Image: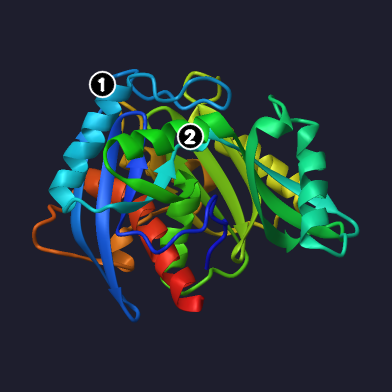
Amino acid sequence: MSIFTSWLASPPPDAALELAPDSVSGAVVSARGSDATVQSFAFEPLPAGALVPSLTGQNVVDRPAVVAAIKAVMDRIGRPKKVALVVPDLATRVSLVRFDQLPASREDLDQLIRWQVKKSAPFPIEEASLTWTPGSQAIEGGHEFVVALARRDVIREYESACESAGLHAGLIDLSTFSVVNCYLAGGRVPTGDWLVVQVRSDYTSIAIMRGGDVIFFRNRGEGEGDALADLVHQTTMYYQDRLSGQGFTRVLVGGTGRPGGDLEMARRGLEERLGVPVETIDPTRVAMLTDRITVTRDVMARLAPLVGMMLRTRQETAAA
């Protein structure tokens, strides 16, 4: 059920940690067979401007504040040592690349993908951390790949903040991909095309899925112009015109929402714009909560990427 490969292979993590612009969140998820339980969860707000996700600039701006928040969260969830780390979408660039023919070796394929994304990378490809995974069968034929690109020193900022808090972050993934994995962890991949919208405090990300494959990904930072409804409308037009879209079988919304608004407002707005029911991503569909965790809409939104990340790592470990 994984749609994204890890930056760095490592032993299974003890917990999942998300570093977001507004907060640090962490959770411990246990799994036996198909049953999963969130054993502990905590989040700690961050001062404004402490973490500013960016593809090219400094991300961890107030390092002491970020490290202190990580330590506070870890103390409350049981002080794990190894974590799977969820980072903001804006810290990376996700693209889909297609090739008519593929080289024989994986090493040559990796070099071909690097050569392709080098053309649009906003920094030298030699400075990049890059990972890719096979995508869907390209509509025009050939082979498609989902590629994530980040500056190596930016990823190092997130890893280093964890290390200063006594943690090893051996596995790293994007917030929206982890939210998608939370939904897929239920074991039922929707048929047809489905839309996932994640609304966070400083950005909105949109993924279009075809079955279990990503066929479109886009994110937009706060203040970059279009309102959510307009961004979804533009995406839908592109989907119909360029991706042979026949309509969405499901529309899902996740995230914490914008300051001054909430996720329910975003959900209702999407329903009005798209004319179809919109579901809120609910991590309790795939993982039970202990009585110690208070269930609120905000908690559910923060838990979704953490649960998705942890269940994905459990599935990959079992498959191995």
Between 29 and 189, the residue placed more toward the observer is: 29
Query: Which class describes the residues within 10 Å of circle 2: few (<14), some (14-19), or many (20+)?
Result: few
Q: Identify whether 304 is placed above or below 269.
A: below
Task: Report, in whole angstroms, how far the alpha carbon at label 2 lies from the one at label 1.
Answer: 21 Å
Q: Position of residue 190 (x, y in %)?
A: 54, 68
Which circle marks residue 133 in the picture? none
Q: Position of residue 120 (x, y in %)?
A: 76, 30
23, 158: nearer the viewer: 158
Q: Which residue is mark 1?
A: 47
What crowding class fits label 1: few (fewer than 14 Cα within 10 Å), some (14-19), or many (20 or more)? Answer: some
Q: Tell me what residue is drawn at x 45 percent, y 71 percent.
A: 317
Q: Report the mark closest to the observer, 2 or 1.
A: 2
Whether residue 252 is visible:
no
Counting from the top left corner in percent of width and height, residue 44 is at 21, 35
Residue visible at 55% across and 50% down? 7
Label 1 sits on a secondary structure element that is loop
Q: Residue at x 32, y 23 (%)?
A: 63
Residue carrying label 2? 156
Residue furthest out toward the right: 101
For this view, does 196 lie left or right of residue 46?
A: right
Using the image as rendered, state which of residue 94 and residue 215 is in the foreground: 94
Q: Residue 59, position in %: x, y?
A: 45, 25
Answer yes or no: is residue 152 visible: yes
